[in-house]
């Protein structure tokens, strides 16, 4: 049996590893989206630089979490207090092993505690199936942002009892 995945809040010292997880997830896991176009990959990755991540980590309206397996970071997620899921990235070798689901459930829990009635995400076409599997519904048709096609999804978040 595989060890359990632990989800914990990210800290400013984690900015470098978070940026590397995101970069690897984009380069490998999102290849169907960017078609290995170096300019497209570069633009996408630049939106999640160490500087951007560091600013998000100290912003009280953002929550970043890490998925750890035996104390090794395998994934990262981010939500904002307005209900936006900024991202959910997992190291490619950990795809389909529960890390993404655990990250997303933790992000949704953080939103519920804040009374946010709905989570929303702008997903890649590839990632949309993952979110649909976890209860997200399409809320807008495909959009194109700098050469990347996306899907707007949302999910009602029942408030905790």
Image: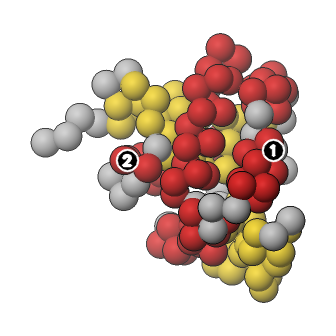
Residue at image point 57% right, 70% down: 32
Which quadrant would the N terminus be assigned to in this image?
Answer: top left
Residue found at the far front of this picture: 38
Q: In which image quadrant can residue 96 be found? A: bottom left
Mark 1, secondary structure of its residue: loop
Of residues 53 and 114, the one drawn nearer to the viewer in this rendering: 53
Q: Dot 2: within a 10 Å radius of its alpha carbon, few (fewer than 14), some, or many (20 or more) residues?
A: few
Q: Considering only vertical position in the picture, is 133 above or below 76?
A: below
Residue at image point 65% right, 55% down: 159
Residue at image point 75% right, 74% down: 149
**x then y, percent, for residue 60:** 83, 28
**x then y, percent, for residue 63:** 71, 35
Mark 2, secondary structure of its residue: helix
Of residues 100 and 43, the one drawn nearer to the viewer in this rendering: 43
Q: Considering only vertical position in the picture, is 14 above or below 141?
A: above
Q: Please give left or right for residue 76 compared with residue 81 in the image.
A: left
- The span from disc 2 to disc 1 (Cα, nearest Å) is 23 Å
Residue found at the far top of this picture: 13
Circle 1 is placed at which residue position? 47
Of residues 136 and 51, the one drawn nearer to the viewer in this rendering: 51
Q: In which image quadrant can residue 153 be found? A: bottom right
Question: According to the image, what is the colour scheme of the structure?
Answer: secondary structure
Report if residue 14 is visible in the image.
yes
Q: In which image quadrant can residue 72 be found? A: top left
Q: Please give left or right for residue 42 compared with residue 159 in the image.
A: right
Circle 2 is placed at which residue position? 94
């Amino acid at each position: 049996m595989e060890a359990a995945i632990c989800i914990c809040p990210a800290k400013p010292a984690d900015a470098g590893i978070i940026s590397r997880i995101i970069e690897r997830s984009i380069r490998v896991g999102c290849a169907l989206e960017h078609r290995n176009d170096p300019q497209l990959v570069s633009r996408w990755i630049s939106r999640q630089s160490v500087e951007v991540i560091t600013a998000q980590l100290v912003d009280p309206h953002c929550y970043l979490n890490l998925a750890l397996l035996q104390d090794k970071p395998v994934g990262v997620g981010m939500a904002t207090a307005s209900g936006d899921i900024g991202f959910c990235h997992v190291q490619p070798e950990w795809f389909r092993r529960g890390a993404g689901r655990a990250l997303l459930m933790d992000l949704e829990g953080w939103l519920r505690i804040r009374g946010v009635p709905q989570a929303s995400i702008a997903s890649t076409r590839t990632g949309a199936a993952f979110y649909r599997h976890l209860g997200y519904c399409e809320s807008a048709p495909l959009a194109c942002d700098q050469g990347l096609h996306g899907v707007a999804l949302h999910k009602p978040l029942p408030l905790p009892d």
